[in-house]
Image (cartoon, grey):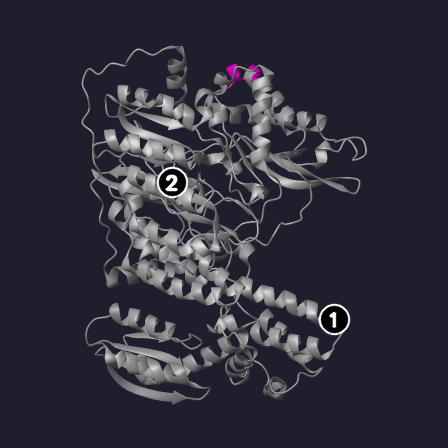
Amino acid sequence: MSGYIIPKSVENDFTVFTKQYNDFLNGSLDALVFKTIRVPFGIYEQREPNTYMIRVKLAGGVITPKQLLELSNLSQKYANSILHVTTRGGVQLHYVKLKDFLNVIKVLHEIGLTGRGGGGNTVRNITADPYAGIAKDEIFDVTPHALALTSKMLEKKDSYALPRKYKIAFSGSSADRGGATFIDVGFIAKIKEGKRGFSVFVAGGMGAKSKIGHRFIDFLPENEIYLLSQAIKELFDEKGNRKNKHAARLRFLFEELGEEEFRKLLHVKIEKLKNKGGWQIELQNLPEVTPLKNSALPTLNEEENLWWDRYVYAQKQEGYFCAKIPLSLGDLDASKAKELALKLEKIVNGRDVIRFGSDQNIYIRNLEAYELLSLYPLFKSLSALTVKPSIIGDSVVCTGAATCQLGITIPRGAIKAVEKALIKSGINLDELKGFKIHMSGCPNSCGRHAIADLGFFGKVLREGSNPYPAYNILVGAKTGENITRFGKKTADISAYHLPSFTAELLTLWIEAKKKYSNFSDWIDDRGEQKVLELAQKYSSVPSFDEDKNPYYDYSAKEIFSLKGRGAGECSAGMYDLIEADKKALNAALKDEPNESNLANIRLLAARMLLVTRGEEARSEREVLEAFKKHFINSSLISADFAPLLDGRATKDVVSLANAVIELYGTMDNSLKFAAEIEQKASEAKTKSSSIQNADKFKDYRGVACPMNFVKTKMDLAQMKSGEILEILLDDGAPIDNVPRSVASEGHAVLEQIKQGGGYWIVRIRKK
């Protein structure tokens, strides 16, 4: 089977990335600017200097044996020989060197995979139920929908510069194994009057102020999934909070607008998209397996039978089975992955055989019993968890402080300690099949702790003046179309006591589970009180002088601290650049006002807001000239400060810095300032009748070349022949270049009318 389609636009983006990468290497591109460029390609810096992680999209977790083979080769050649399966069913290559970026991306594109949108404020990997296409309870297979929507979103330029990340998920049944009820946009398969479609949930998400999704549409025809997803994306792009990254996700916008206003604005977006056309999707026909009549299981020995009970699933296609390979910490040794890929290539005969799940495990599917059994020895060598109870195999953790800039604790070490404690406890762990333990190293929920039966996320506690690693405890989550709820945060526990706490709590649950249908019911009845009592029992740690062990995190070689914890790169974008300069500017304002420091204050003040105008000025002179053009000449900053931009910096630059900071305080979520908003509102009232007669109007003031031409070209592509496009362009390079470029493509430039304030009205008739 084929996966999603990488559009030409992504290849073009890579060409641009290659130039910017070389600019960074030769020192002509600032590191912070390059960060905002590489992160939307799924490239994140790790804690170890000059090492990076590259995240690869696998829509719906779909991957072919050939792709797995080539990913393994990449990992061995350029990374740490480990494929890390993510909690969105993608793959990460860790410890990639800067010099190898281009080689890795080239190979990914050659095998039909990309990291575009793997990080930053982008449309992220679209997930689906790992049992999609084979589950006995599914309404229909949602795999084609995840693939088609991924292909459509990849080709859209507006998928890569959103206010914050945008996530989409598909589930084939109300069991919601794909996580549709707690994500930005979630689809759950339905059939109504013989037609396929989806119930839709919007504005959910985990992390800061987690929210369950709102049931938004009871039935959406399947061919409208892109129409709705794109309309929501456009509304999010237009109205989302770009200034405060902590309130930037779709759920905050939904809450700010209210459901009624959200629906009203969304309806306008949908109608515009319908009128443009091209919103329908094309679904792939996936390979099917023919059910086998009267198939019988081969004879299993005791060990094989135990494995079969724990990890093998009988598919809806009679005679076929799916085996889950539980990966420790989501890690897959590249050499073993190659061996698996090669063996599967020999037996699959065109079948869809591999999925990566959001539980960080691998699902080998569409195999007959004897084929699956023949692979069991390889599964064991691939993962030691294959012979362990499913409660251990199903645990989910993020990398935490081991590599992540945001990590507080190291859940990878903690879960290993929990595993040892559970095995040592003597509990019959097979009685806990289906029980989920999830851990994150910080509140950001990369370990999906909010949807676990027992969830933990990292925090810091203190004994006297000494900090030690600890975890918040969440209990009793459940997932389903009409029942989803997040775990209740009940107490906290030191990392040191976490294994003992977990073993004792599960012992209590096994004793109680005969009376309750599930763990969440017990929590609601009396279990929460038991959790509190148990947490209280383990509430203290020895003093640092008595015992230093609680002050080390698991697998750490140094005493616990937050040293090395960075700002994180998930929100890399314009706001990060502004905040970085603002922080440096505030620090400079506190220093002694000598000649060097005053020059630094002037540079930082002038550069701080240039990114809102699309400028990438690099030298000091370029920065000062661009600042004069965009802020002094436009009257956003008083012309009285103009003389300060020439010659030596004087003490008056302190007033300039304060004026810039004050202006920043008036900036709205779309990076517009109060003064220019008022100015444009006034202009709109007095706009000439010629403007009102245009078929489409766009304001491209503040958009630098060549992006203003790219946007104009995209506008014209969406219009009919003979229609009039009216745009506003800045004086200088924009008015010199854009009309000439438009005319060279055969369109007619009807008028160029200069306006006060340094901009032009340009009217274009589409050819």
Q: Which residue is mark 2?
A: 72
The answer to whether the residues at label 1 and label 2 have Cβ atoms under 8 Å apart is no
Point out which mark residue 591 bears.
Answer: 1
Q: Which residues are magenta?
A: 511-516
**In the rendered view, does 431 fall on the left or right side of 175?**
right
Mark 1 and mark 2 lie on one chain; the one further toward the N terminus is: 2
Please, is residue 67 above or below residue 368 in the view? below
Mark 1 or 2, closer to the camera: 2
Point out which mark residue 290 bears.
Answer: none
Q: Mark 1 is on which residue type?
A: Asp
Question: What secondary structure prevails in the magenta region?
Answer: helix
At a point 66% along the width and 78% down the height, the residue shown is: 599
Q: Position of residue 435 (x, y in %)?
A: 49, 25
User: Under tag 2, what secondary structure?
Assistant: helix
Q: Position of residue 287 (x, y in %)?
A: 21, 36
Q: Position of residue 545 (x, y in %)?
A: 81, 34
Please, is residue 56 above or below residue 261 in the view? above
Of the 4 image quadrants, the one containing the N terminus is: top left
**In the rendered view, does 170 fall on the left or right side of 477?**
left
Q: Nearer the viewer, residue 293 or 695?
A: 293
Query: Based on the displayed image, in which of its 4 quarters is residue 356 positioned?
Result: top left
Q: Nearer the viewer, residue 46 or 164?
A: 46
